[in-house]
Image (spheres, rainbow, N blue to C red):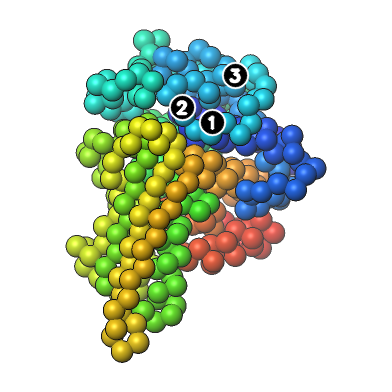
């Protein structure tokens, strides 16, 4: 078993910043009692065993910089909980733009939005070559929501390079049977789609739905309204980019309701961009149902959280489980860790069951 997990990153935004900071934070505090990990040890792999070996972005303020510097470059605005990230000698390469840049971004201040680099874009063969030369095990896909072509571009590069693909955004690849079959045929383990935070709006909403159904309360209506101040929310102001995101978030919740409540009775999705919130995300959740005697009841809840660190813990587990699958020679979608860490996995399971499956997978009692 290789001690290091060699990771490439497509999209060096806030989520990548939190992930990279986390590697060094937990390395520095390895002998201390620290918070924030769902699994400290995954088959012998610790958080600090992750090593970034390649990265791509399309922003002029990141391309050409060392990853250690790029993760703190504008428009990144997430919490800095580990400022001492050492130089990695890994330069951020210019990615393939395709649909990764929403045109409305150019009308916003550069410190809040993307500034497109004019460097030569890496073509598919360039990405494949870099993945092979750096001996990457896994590519983490963090391209912006709505970048359907860009997501598939990096997925195809992984297929050709024999590298695992972890899809942190809501383009359906791992949960698409055609793509899943391609990776399974090549014997490449993959995890996806659309990262589910440790305690985010989706997992909280799912927990409420499970509570209502377990306790016999009939769910009639529910909504989840989200807004924040990072580039993810600014990007999603273009509603055309939200199609798969809305499907992903809605199905993550509706899949746990064992009866139809009607499409018009469930509303889930990003609502607005509030610049001064930066990487903070606020979610309002409302559940309406009927309890004993058909008496109506309501639950209203507000979640306020730093968005990117909230997802980095899930990604750290996904990366380590994916490497474990590579060590074991397992190919195709990893159903357990996908269900536990992703909003739109190939197969949805209740979260308690997904965690049990992950524990079984780590112990070697479940293939995937």
Q: Is residue 243 left or right of residue 73?
A: left
Tell me which label, 3 or 1, sits earlier in the chain. 1
In the image, residue 156 above or below residue 39: above
Q: Position of residue 123 (x, y in %)?
A: 40, 19
User: Residue at the location (26% across, 57% down)?
Assistant: 267
Mark 3–mark 1 Cα distance, whole angstroms, equals 14 Å
User: Residue at the location (47% across, 42% down)?
Assistant: 307
Q: Residue furthest right?
A: 31
User: Residue at the location (40% across, 76% down)?
Assistant: 213
Marks 3 and 2: CB-CB under 8 Å? no
Q: Which residue is mark 2?
A: 76
Q: Which mark is residue 90?
A: 3
Marks 3 and 1: CB-CB under 8 Å? no
Mark 3–mark 2 Cα distance, whole angstroms, equals 18 Å
Mark 1–mark 2 Cα distance, whole angstroms, equals 8 Å
Tell me which label, 3 or 2, sits earlier in the chain. 2
Q: Residues within 10 Å of mark 3 (few under 14, many from 20)?
A: some
């Amino acid at each position: 078993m290789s001690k290091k997990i060699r990771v490439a990153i497509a999209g060096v935004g806030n989520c990548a910043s939190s992930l990279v900071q986390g590697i060094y934070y937990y390395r520095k505090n390895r002998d201390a009692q620290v918070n924030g990990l769902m699994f400290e040890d995954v088959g012998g792999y610790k958080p600090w065993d992750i090593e970034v070996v390649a990265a791509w972005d399309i922003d002029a303020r990141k391309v050409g910089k060392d990853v250690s510097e790029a993760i703190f470059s504008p428009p990144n605005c997430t919490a800095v909980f580990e400022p001492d990230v050492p130089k990695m000698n890994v330069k951020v390469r210019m990615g393939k733009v395709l649909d990764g840049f929403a045109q409305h971004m150019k009308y916003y201040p550069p410190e809040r939005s993307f500034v497109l680099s004019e460097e030569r874009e890496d073509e598919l063969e360039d990405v494949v070559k870099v993945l092979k030369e750096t001996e990457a095990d896994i590519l983490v896909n963090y391209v912006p929501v709505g970048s359907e072509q860009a997501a598939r571009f990096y997925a195809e590069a992984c297929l050709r390079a024999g590298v695992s693909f972890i899809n942190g955004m809501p383009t359906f690849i791992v949960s698409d049977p055609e793509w899943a079959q391609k990776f399974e045929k090549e014997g490449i383990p993959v995890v996806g789609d659309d990262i589910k935070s440790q305690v985010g709006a989706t997992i909280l909403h799912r927990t409420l739905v499970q509570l209502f159904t377990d306790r016999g309360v009939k769910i009639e209506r529910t909504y989840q309204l989200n807004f924040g101040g990072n580039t993810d929310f600014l990007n999603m102001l273009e509603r055309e980019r939200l199609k798969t995101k809305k499907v992903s978030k809605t199905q993550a919740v509706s899949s746990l309701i064992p009866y139809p409540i009607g499409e018009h009775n469930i509303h889930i999705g990003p609502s607005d961009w509030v610049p001064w919130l930066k990487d903070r995300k606020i979610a309002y959740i409302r559940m309406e149902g009927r309890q004993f005697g058909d008496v109506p009841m309501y639950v209203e809840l507000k979640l306020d959280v730093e968005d990117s660190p909230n997802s980095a813990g899930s990604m750290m587990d996904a990366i380590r489980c994916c490497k474990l699958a590579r060590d074991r020679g397992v190919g195709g979608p990893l159903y357990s860790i996908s269900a536990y860490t992703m909003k739109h996995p190939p197969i949805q399971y209740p979260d308690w069951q997904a965690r049990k499956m992950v524990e079984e997978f780590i112990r070697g009692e479940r293939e995937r």
